[in-house]
Amino acid sequence: MKTKIISVIILLQFAIVAAWAQTYTADAAKSTLNWKAEKLTGFHEGTIAIKSGTFKIEKDKVTSGKFVISMSTIVDTDLTDAEYNKKLIGHLSSPDFFDVTKFPEAIFTITQPVDVSKSVAEVHGNLTLKGVSKPLTFKAVVKKEGTSYTFSANSIVVDRTVYGIKYGSGSFFSDLGDKVIYDEFTIKLKLVMNQ
């Protein structure tokens, strides 16, 4: 009898812990990442795939987590000329920019608790790009549906030069003329996390 009582207590303890901390996994098929980079004479935009991700949510707060971006899936959606499109993707994938052969993944890691009880949450983390980790903060709209959370951010601003991506930057080169590519690019993110 005593053994049964101890077993029940242990099971209850596990149940309480499970209720406090839940693991959510990124739904790669429903998650999206759109990018836009501007230059003096125009812009380019496209998509990159979310590869994976996990969040630990405890008492309405994301206590830890990360998501992984597959850099080899860069797509440009504004260029209709197939040859020029291929050339651009090749350049973006090269060491001048993201060097995807050497660095096939970018990772965002949460560094502070994220309050998911609010409709808009502030997300603090580190973005690791080309092997360099730098702090990145953005606001995300949080929506809970059943056992899923959706985090949406319309304008995450990233300065590529802090990750050593200086190609075409007017901040580092003074003789570029109209070939200047702006240092900052923007990301529109939708991250769907399922329990």
Image (cartoon, rainbow, N blue to C red):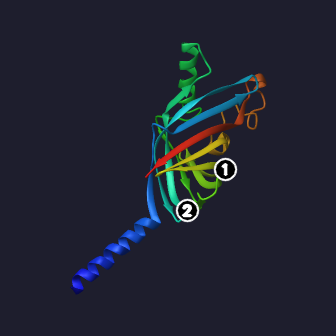
Q: Residue 17: where, in percent of width, then height?
A: 41, 70
Name the amino acid, label 2.
Asp
Element type at mark 1: strand
Q: Do we see residue 130 in this rendering?
A: no
Nearer to me, 46 or 100: 46
Among the 4 quarters of the image, the one containing residue 23: bottom left
- Between 31 and 180, which is closer to the camera in this rendering? 31
Q: Where in the figure is residue 181, as x and y percent of width and height?
A: 71, 30
Q: Is residue 118 left or right of residue 15?
A: right
Location of residue 111 with respect to 145 vertically, above or below: below
> Considering depth in this image, is 27 or 91 the residue closer to the camera?
27
The residue shown at (74%, 33%) is 173
- The Cα atoms of the two marked residues, 1 and 2, are separated by 17 Å
User: Which class describes the residues within 10 Å of circle 2: few (<14), some (14-19), or many (20+)?
Assistant: some
Q: Which picture quadrant has residue 47?
A: top right
Residue ID at (74%, 28%): 180
| Residue under label 1 | 139
Residue 150, x across and y down, in percent: 55, 46
Q: Secondary structure at mark 2?
A: loop
Whether tag 1 and tag 2 are in contact, CB under 8 A, the answer is: no
At 64% from the left and 57% from the top, the residue drawn is: 118
The residue under the point 76% across, 33% down is 170
Three-letter amino acid code of the residue under disc 1 = Lys
Report the residue that reaches farthest toward the bottom.
2
Quarter of the rendering occupied by the N terminus: bottom left
Determine which quarter of the picture holds residue 82: top right
Marks 1, 2: nearer the viewer: 2
Residue 60's tag is 2
Give the answer, above or below, for where 166 lies relative to 9: above
Q: Is residue 40 visible?
A: yes
Return the disc, 1 or 2, that comes first in the chain's sequence. Answer: 2
Q: On screen, 95 above or below 5?
A: above
